[in-house]
Each structure stands twice: as C-alpha cells, then as structure tokens.
Image: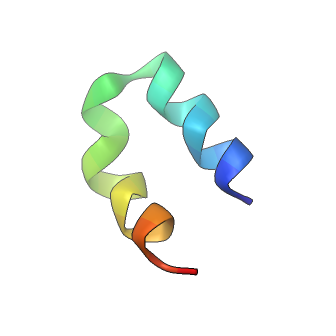
Amino acid sequence: MYVVLWRVLSVDSHTTQGFFVFVVEP
C-alpha cells in the first residue's frame, strides 16, 4: 500500500500533498 504512494513521491516530490493523507492513515 504505502509502497505505491512512495513511488509517486519518487516521481514528484510535490505529489506528497495528495499522497500524504494515505501515509497518515493506517
């Protein structure tokens, strides 16, 4: 789960705003 989110971050550090919510959630 978090693996996919991390991939997005690697592609675009600015994407953190959109995927950050997922990381915070369990």
Residue located farthest toward the bottom when viewing the structure as drawn: 26
The residue lying at 50 percent from left, 19 percent from top is: 11
Asked whether 26 or 19 is in front, the reply is: 26
Quadrant of image for the C terminus = bottom right
Left-right relation of 4 to 13? right
Rendered location of residue 3, percent (x, y): 72, 44
* Residue 4, percent from left and from top: 70, 45
> Is 8 located above or below residue 21 in the figure?
above
Q: Position of residue 17 (x, y in %)?
A: 25, 51
Locate residue 8, reporting x and y percent: 54, 34
Rendered-image quadrant of the N terminus:
bottom right
- Quarter where residue 12 is shown: top left
Colour scheme of the picture: rainbow
Give the residue at x 37% y 69%.
21
Q: Residue at 62% of width from left, 31% of height from top?
A: 7
Q: Would you say 14 lies left or right of 19 here?
A: left
Number of numbered discs: 0
Q: Is residue 2 above or below residue 3?
A: below
Q: Nearer the viewer, residue 26 or 8?
A: 26
State which quadrant residue 19 falls in.
Answer: bottom left
Vertical arrangement, residue 25 with respect to residue 18, above or below? below
- Left of 24 or right of it: where is 2? right
